């Protein structure tokens, strides 16, 4: 399949940003977000709509004006909303058999070609790319069906997955002719006020967990709705209930985990077993700590809740730990892992978010969690990172020719990272797993995993 860029231009807001909005301060949650770029693909059928898309993009940028600006050179915590615009590319796709065929058997190497640039290969000296906060590539299949792929890269310094979803749906609504009154959920820029920027005192956000010296492989594992339901049944959690026992004791009640908790715990189980099977690991004299981090959207967990269109990085990492001890104990039943993840996510509550509004509290929390994970130099720590995009209305993004046939994250050259996304039906989960080439070869041979995924 050949993807050839045929045009490149800059799209600016349809109306200039007012002078009093020219400087947009990042919230301190934005300040500590990893300075990487998120990638996303929306697959759509129907004919060419590029002129409409460019015009509507320009109109949406008027509402999302920071995206058309640039991070200030002299102040890394502010955006100069100078209306410099976003990169917009158009590409022609040939020799591929059409979009529908690609969706049936997606190739991650082809997926990368649908992005306007490779987000993890940016040369800092290339100002044309490194300073742009949003870039879009519209790729049109050169066949009778005329399928379209919209690939986007957005700076994580300014936005999280929820913010990206808000922008995509605003742009789509504008493209199909919705009025301002019908859209009425443009971005809400409250976060810099609720979480004012702070002096990070030399703290530098981690730039990712890329292991360039080892080849990273991305694979998609689809848990269809029926298999996901089976997985949830396996992971029923016993929960102590003290509210209804007239004798004052505890009754045990059963709870089903969420689908994200169930799938995350199962992948964690496979990951732990993969590591334990490595030569020398089980026989090592030191305890081994397995940690899961889960990025939790905190908009609805704040008191009072923030609207879903709150723009910026509004998430907090949850941490779950599993210790395999020196006695060679390897008993980590699946329901226990589900409960560990559930309890970790529950800790990201309204009180937690309230504490984040106190100066330096988040940094102290983050550093304390890292300290807990590596609290002893005698322990080996193996970390698996999760990010869930499930529940974000990406599949609602109708640009005027129907809803997306498929939405997917971009392949990530980051070791031990899993991104969870909805299937188009909404009932299942696609797990995009990124591991080293050697680990992936073993991971995808797991018989229990193969029985549950397609």
Image (cartoon, rainbow, N blue to C red):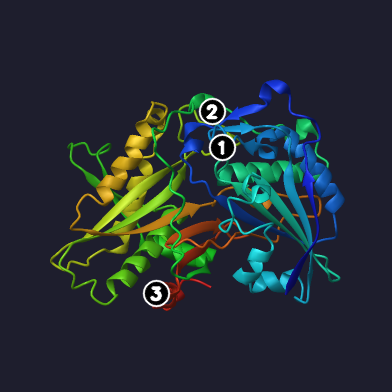
Horizontal relation, residue 227 to residue 91: left or right: left
Q: How far apart are the two marked residues, 3 and 2, measured between alpha carbons?
A: 46 Å
Give the residue displayed 37% in from the left and 62% down from the top.
268
* N-terminal label among 2 and 1: 2
Foreground pick, 306 / 133: 133
Is residue 252 visible in this depiction of the protein? no
Seen in the picture, residue 174 relative to 355 is either above or below; the reply is below
Q: Pointer 1: what residue?
A: 312
Which mark is drawn over residue 448?
3
Q: Secondary structure at mark 2?
A: helix
How far across and down, in percent of the image, does residue 320 sit? 32, 51
Specify whether residue 135 is in view.
yes
Q: What SS does tag 1 mark? A: loop
Q: Earlier in the sequence, mark 1 or mark 3?
A: 1
Foreground label between 3 and 2:
2
Q: Is 55 left or right of 425, judged from the image as shown?
A: right
Task: Say the numbered circle drawn on residue 174.
Answer: none
Q: Is residue 424 left or right of residue 203?
A: right
Coordinates of residue 16 in the picture (x, y in percent): 78, 29
* Horizontal side, residue 362 vs residue 50: left or right: left
Give the x, y percent position of residue 12.
78, 39
């Amino acid at each position: 399949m050949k993807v050839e860029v045929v045009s490149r231009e800059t799209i600016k807001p349809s109306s200039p940003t007012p002078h009093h909005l020219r400087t947009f301060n990042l919230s301190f949650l934005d300040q500590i977000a990893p300075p990487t770029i998120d990638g996303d693909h929306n697959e759509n059928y129907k004919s060419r709509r590029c002129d409409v898309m460019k015009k509507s993009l320009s109109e949406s940028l008027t509402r999302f004006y920071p995206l058309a600006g640039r991070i200030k050179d002299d102040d890394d915590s502010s955006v100069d909303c100078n209306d410099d615009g976003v990169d917009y590319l158009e590409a022609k796709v040939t020799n591929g058999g059409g979009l529908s065929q690609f969706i049936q058997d997606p190739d991650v190497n082809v997926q990368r070609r649908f992005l306007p640039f490779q987000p993890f290969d940016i040369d800092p000296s290339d100002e044309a790319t490194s300073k742009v906060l949003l870039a879009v590539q519209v790729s049109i299949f050169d066949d009778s069906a005329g399928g379209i792929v919209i690939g986007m890269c957005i700076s994580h310094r300014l936005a999280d997955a929820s913010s990206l979803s808000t922008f995509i749906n605003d742009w789509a609504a504008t493209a199909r002719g919705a009025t301002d009154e019908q859209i009425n959920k443009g971005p809400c820029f409250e976060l810099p006020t609720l979480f004012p920027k702070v002096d990070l005192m030399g703290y530098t956000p981690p730039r990712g967990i890329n292991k360039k010296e080892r080849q990273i492989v991305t694979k998609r594992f689809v848990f269809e709705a029926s298999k996901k339901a089976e997985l949830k049944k396996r992971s029923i959690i016993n929960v102590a209930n003290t509210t209804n026992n007239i004798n004052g004791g505890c009754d045990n009640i059963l709870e089903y985990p969420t689908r994200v908790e169930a799938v995350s715990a199962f992948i964690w189980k496979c990951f732990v077993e993969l590591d334990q099977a490595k030569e020398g690991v089980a026989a090592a004299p030191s305890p081994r700590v397995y940690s899961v981090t889960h990025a939790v959207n905190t908009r609805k967990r704040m008191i009072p809740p923030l609207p879903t269109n709150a723009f910026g990085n509004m998430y907090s990492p949850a941490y779950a730990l599993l210790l395999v001890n020196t006695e060679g104990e390897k008993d980590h039943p699946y329901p226990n892992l589900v409960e560990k993840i559930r309890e970790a996510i529950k800790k990201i509550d309204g009180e937690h978010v309230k504490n984040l509004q106190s100066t330096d509290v988040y940094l102290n929390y983050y550093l304390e969690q890292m300290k807990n994970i590596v609290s002893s130099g005698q322990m080996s720590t193996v970390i698996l990172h999760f990010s869930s995009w499930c529940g974000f209305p990406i599949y609602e993004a109708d640009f005027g020719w129907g809803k997306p046939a498929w939405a997917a994250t971009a392949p990530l050259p980051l070791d031990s990272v899993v991104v969870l996304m909805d299937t188009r039906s909404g009932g299942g989960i696609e797990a995009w797993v990124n591991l080293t080439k050697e680990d992936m070869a073993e991971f995808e041979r797991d018989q229990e995993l193969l029985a549950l995924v397609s």
